Amino acid sequence: MPLRVFECACVVVVLFTLALMARRTPARRLVGDYAALAVAGFIGEETCVRFYRFYAYAEGWDGRIDEVPILVPLIWPLVILSARSVANALAPDASAVRRALAVGALVVVDASLVEVVAVRAGLWSWAEPGHLGVPLLGIIGWGFFAFAADLAPRLVGRAPRAIGLVAVVVIAPLATHAMILAAWWACFRWTLRGDLGSAPLAVLGAASVAATLGALYMRGRGRAMALDVATPRMAAALLFLALLALTVAPWEGAVARGLWLHTLAVAAPYLAATRFGASSSRAVRA
């Protein structure tokens, strides 16, 4: 898929997703959350690229602000906001910390799919090999950001909402760097680096089976994602599925099979957790 076509498709997905989210969330709240996450995402992305030089975007992206294509911080807020909706739907009574952990974990899963497909398609590249071309820390780093961004507004307590949004912009990038550096020096500087073979895929497969069974169990107890919660994520997933299909076929070797198996492993629990029907969910807490 030509990069220009992919960029146009991203714009369509962003607008479509915002329109869907606006049906469940008051426009003023949605715009504030989206803007704060976009600014925080750009700061985090730009500083990570500049400080660590661990990855770089391909030439040819339009609308680049220094190191970062403008589309990137426009897309990532939707990943985090939709993960928040999923966490609220599946665990509505979770504490602030537990919800932030759930949001971070969901974004790690999402980022794993985005990263391996995008790297294979040549949208960006990493300085060293890893799982299907992506170092594990590169995948986990977005989970760190999502965790911090979801928790930051809660840290200011009952302060005005504007203060909570400023907290996202300030705290999320700083906390992300702190967690990345801690993970690097505690683990990834010394181990779990380079080409890890089939081990990550085996772990992901086992986790996918467990998560799928858990989702089916929760559906049996009446707790599932409504289709209007799942649809924004499906739109983005279909874009990357199309990108993968146009990039590599499953029969083109071990790496190609790994990419398709990775995609299947990520998709299965979401599909199992989704209630496909006409009913819609109520707006969830922020």
Image: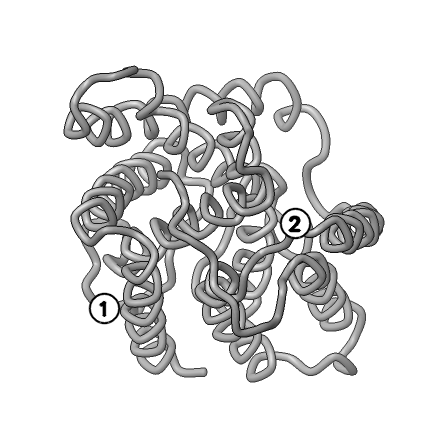
Q: Which amino acid is tagged 2?
A: Arg
- Left or right: where 133 falls relative to 142: right
Residue 252 place in picture, x, y as percent:
75, 81
- Whichever of callouts 1 and 2 sits on the residue coming sooner in the sequence is 1
Q: How many marks?
A: 2
Q: Horizontal and vertical percent for residue 60?
A: 30, 70
Task: Tell me: 231 left or right of 37.
Answer: right
Q: CA distance from mark 1 to mark 2?
A: 42 Å
Which quarter of the rendering shows the C terminus? top left
| Residue 232 percent location from the top left of the image | 44, 64
**Which of the labelled discs sits on residue 62, or is there none?**
1
The residue carrying mark 2 is 223
For this rendering, which residue is in front, 129 or 284? 284
Disc number at residue 77? none
Disc 2 residue crowd, few under 14, some 14–19, many 20+, Cα 10 Å: some
Q: 103 above or below 217?
A: above
Q: Assign a secondary structure to mark 2.
A: loop
In which image quadrant can residue 261 be found? bottom right
